[in-house]
Image (cartoon, helix red, strand yellow):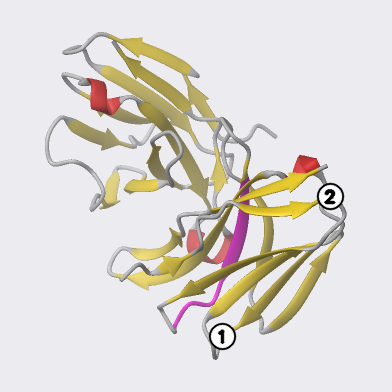
């Protein structure tokens, strides 16, 4: 029973390039959440998605960041024209419907380094 | 005002002592409460959940919930150096977006041998 799968585990991008982070939720989970964590800081909520729908993107920066969760395939967090300040750990979590009642399961994260 | 508050620490306890981690929340309608443990460089891992007032025990861990006072705590008995981590409190919140968890900033626990 595979957990939440994130890839790549580590991603290095030069300033100005695009970063694509992928997340496959646990089997039976239909809700996906993306978080960003800077070193020595807490989790910062970015976006909450269900299949083909963005439910809450209140934590997403207005520019350069986008997320999707298509009918088929993993959820994608896309960062265009990366800057050094985008360097962070990005965690994806998934839950069944009513995730706030049952808790989230987190993936291992993608560590993005912008050079 | 933050919706879920935790003391950032570090909380330092000697090996074998009881570590007490506290969390307060602002949404009186919250019904579900979770504790996650996050080791440095790793992802958060769910270790306890509690829905009803009172205590819930699981091995060396006890979660305590007091809805009237809007706080939830985690006790770790016989603390071990391997318990050194950041502990995140999470509380459900019903809003226009549905039923989501709100995380506190975490308390860093250090257990000294």
Mark yes or no: residue A45 visible. Answer: yes
The residue nearer to you, when weighing B41 against A16, is B41
Q: Which mark is residue B15?
A: 2
Q: Residue at x 27, y 36 (%)?
A: A67
Q: Is residue B46 left or right of residue B111?
A: left
Mark with earlier residue (2, 1): 2
Q: Is residue B2 left or right of residue B13?
A: left
* Alpha-carbon span between mark 2 and mark 1: 31 Å
**Badge 2: residue crowd in 10 Å (few <14, some 14–19, many ≥20):** some
Q: Residue furthest left?
A: A63
Say what secondary structure mark 2 lies in: loop
Mark yes or no: residue A98 visible. Answer: no
Q: Identify the magenta region.
A: B29-37
- Position of residue B10 measured from the top left corner of the image (x, y, whole percent): 58, 51
- Position of residue A74 measured from the top left corner of the image (x, y, whole percent): 42, 29
Q: Is residue A99 left or right of residue A27?
A: left
The residue nearer to you, when weighing B108 against A11, is B108
Q: Which quarter of the figure is the C terminus of chain A placed in?
A: top left
Q: Is residue A8 left or right of residue B59?
A: left
Q: Residue at x 54, y 35 (%)?
A: A107
Q: Nearer the viewer, mark 2 or mark 1?
A: 2
Residue A36 part of the magenta-drawn span:
no
Chain where mark 1 sits: B
Q: Is residue A79 above or below residue B59?
A: above
Say what secondary structure mark 1 lies in: loop
Q: Which quarter of the figure is the N terminus of chain A placed in?
A: top right
Q: Residue furthest bottom?
A: B68
Residue hosting label 1: B67
- Position of residue A15 measured from the top left corner of the image (x, y, whole percent): 20, 12
Circle 2/circle 1 CB separation < 8 Å: no
Q: Residue at x 18, y 41 (%)?
A: A61
**Badge 1: residue crowd in 10 Å (few <14, some 14–19, many ≥20):** some
């Amino acid at each position: 029973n595979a957990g939440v799968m994130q890839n790549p585990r580590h991603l290095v991008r030069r300033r100005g390039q695009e970063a694509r982070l992928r997340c496959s939720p646990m089997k039976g989970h239909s809700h996906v959440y993306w978080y960003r964590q800077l070193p020595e800081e807490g989790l910062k909520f970015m976006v909450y998605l269900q299949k083909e729908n963005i439910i809450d993107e209140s934590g997403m920066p207005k520019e350069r960041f986008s997320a999707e969760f298509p009918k088929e395939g993993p959820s994608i967090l896309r960062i265009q024209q990366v800057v050094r300040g985008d360097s962070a750990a990005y965690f994806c979590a998934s839950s069944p419907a009513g995730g706030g009642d049952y808790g989230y399961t987190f993936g291992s994260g993608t560590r993005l380094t912008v050079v | 005002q933050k919706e879920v508050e935790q003391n950032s620490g570090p909380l330092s306890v000697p090996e074998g002592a009881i570590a007490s981690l506290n969390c307060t929340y602002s949404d009186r309608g919250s019904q579900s409460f979770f504790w996650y443990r996050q080791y440095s460089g790793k992802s958060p891992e769910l270790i306890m959940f509690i829905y009803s007032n009172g205590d819930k025990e699981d091995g060396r861990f006890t979660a305590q919930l007091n809805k009237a006072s809007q706080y939830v705590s985690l006790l770790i008995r016989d603390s071990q150096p391997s318990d050194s981590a950041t502990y995140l409190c999470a509380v459900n919140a019903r809003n226009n977006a549905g039923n989501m968890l709100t995380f506190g900033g975490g308390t860093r626990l250090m257990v000294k041998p």
